[in-house]
Amino acid sequence: MNAPVTPRTATLILVCGSIVVSLSLGIRHTFGLFLQPMTQDLGWSREAFSFAIAIQNLVWGAGGPITGWLADRWGAGKVVFGGGVLYAAGVALMAYATTPFMFTVAAGLLVGLGLAATTFSVIYGAVGRAVAPEKRAMALALVGAAGSFGQFLLVPAGQQLISASGWLAALTGLAVAAALIAPLALGTAEKREDNARHAMAQSAAEALREAFGQRAFWLLTLGYFVCGFQVVFIGAHLPSYVLDKGLTANVGMLALALIGLFNIFGTYGFGMLGGRLSKKNLLAGLYLTRSIVIAVFLLAPLSPASVAVFAAAMGLLWLGTVPLTNGLVAQIFGVRYLAMLSGFVFFSHQVGSFLGVWLGGLLFDKTGSYDIVWMICIALGVVAALINLPVDERPMARLAAQPAR
């Protein structure tokens, strides 16, 4: 039997993977800050900008199962390296796009593929295989919290760059930051024998057939759709929403930064709770609470203070779904094909993301308001809470009969 991953190797994968996710998600969360300055300077509609970001989320989701399968088969390091190169190239091209089509290729296709290779599915797969089962909940929570820290750090930095030097220079600076992902990929490299430790008499195709035949897998997939719709609509359109209501750009920037800050605690907290309590019940409660928070925000008088409170509350609920959902996939189906299976579940998240960001721009252009999309967010949160309650959390029978490692 192959020797287990050493604590030093597991720590290196955890640290480098966390930094990769921090950079990848942090840069991605700044894109909402560019909506108004870019559309105003270039004469584009909000729908044109939103469509490019929507395509980004769709490509990100569609690429997830593929990059996850590649990482499961060949290790995360090579996949992360290629993703970092694509990500940096896409952000750089965003800065110099002169047409909505070119912007869609850059922000949608290239950045979307880069995100698919440098975020949760690939990194969670590597970390999930590297750490002991009893430490997995904490490790996944740390990776999720790192992504939130990137948002907290880079959103204010992005706004500062836009204010001081303009959106063109800001995007160029973010492209340089994205290029740092490539060398960090070395720290996420897995040895082939590390993957072999989790091998079983099951092929990737058999793993997919098994998962697709389970009701729990489809319920998790449908619930994740709602998460994507809500968070990407808010992340892309909240800065413009507060500007439209007469508040300043700094209020929108602060809101995104607060979401990132409180998401550090929320993601880590939900991840840790998932190691002790029912993950499906935590997911249901999280989705229902999101709907309540959005409803209260819309009913309360709008002010910088109410925006800050809303952002803090949403931050606590923002990506807590990620360690819980991925943790359930690992718990039910095992970790051998965790990146691939998580990629399929995440694709649903990104279909929701596509619709959330695109409908936000489309319905605003048609109605002059975001009200309809806010109502959809509330209704979907209730639906997601109900969807997660019937999930069967028990491991598959073949796992129950095996040792923990």
Image (cartoon, helix red, strand yellow):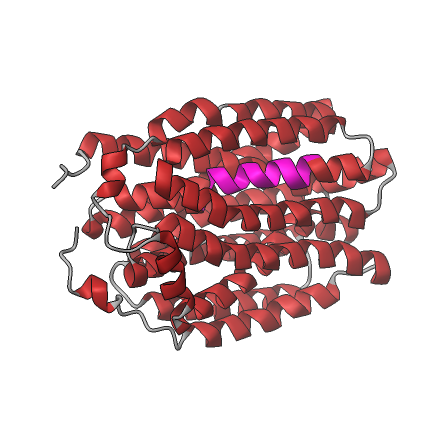
Q: Position of residue 375 (x, y in %)?
A: 67, 70
* Most foreground residue, 377 or 183: 183
Q: Is residue 152 above or below residue 215?
A: above
Q: Name, please, the residue furthest toward the right.
A: 43
Tell me which corner region of the image, top left, top right, bottom left or bottom right, holds residue 101.
top right
Q: Residue at (48%, 37%) from the top-left corner?
A: 150
Q: Position of residue 67 (x, y in %)?
A: 47, 42
**Part of the protein shown in magenta:** 106-120
* Most foreground residue, 30 or 212: 212
Q: Position of residue 86 (x, y in %)?
A: 57, 30
Residue 133 appears left or right of 101: left
Q: Position of residue 400 (x, y in %)?
A: 18, 65
Q: Residue at (33%, 41%) from the top-left corner?
A: 126
Please tell me how many numbered marks the rendered image carries.
0
- In the rendered image, residue 113 lying in the magenta stretch gets the answer yes
Q: Quadrant of the N terminus?
A: top left
Q: Is residue 136 above or below residue 227?
A: above
Residue 92 appears left or right of 85: right
Residue 305 appears left or right of 271: right
Tell me which corner region of the image, top left, top right, bottom left or bottom right, holds residue 253.
top right
Q: Is residue 55 above or below residue 177?
A: below
Q: Residue at (71%, 37%) from the top-left corner?
A: 105
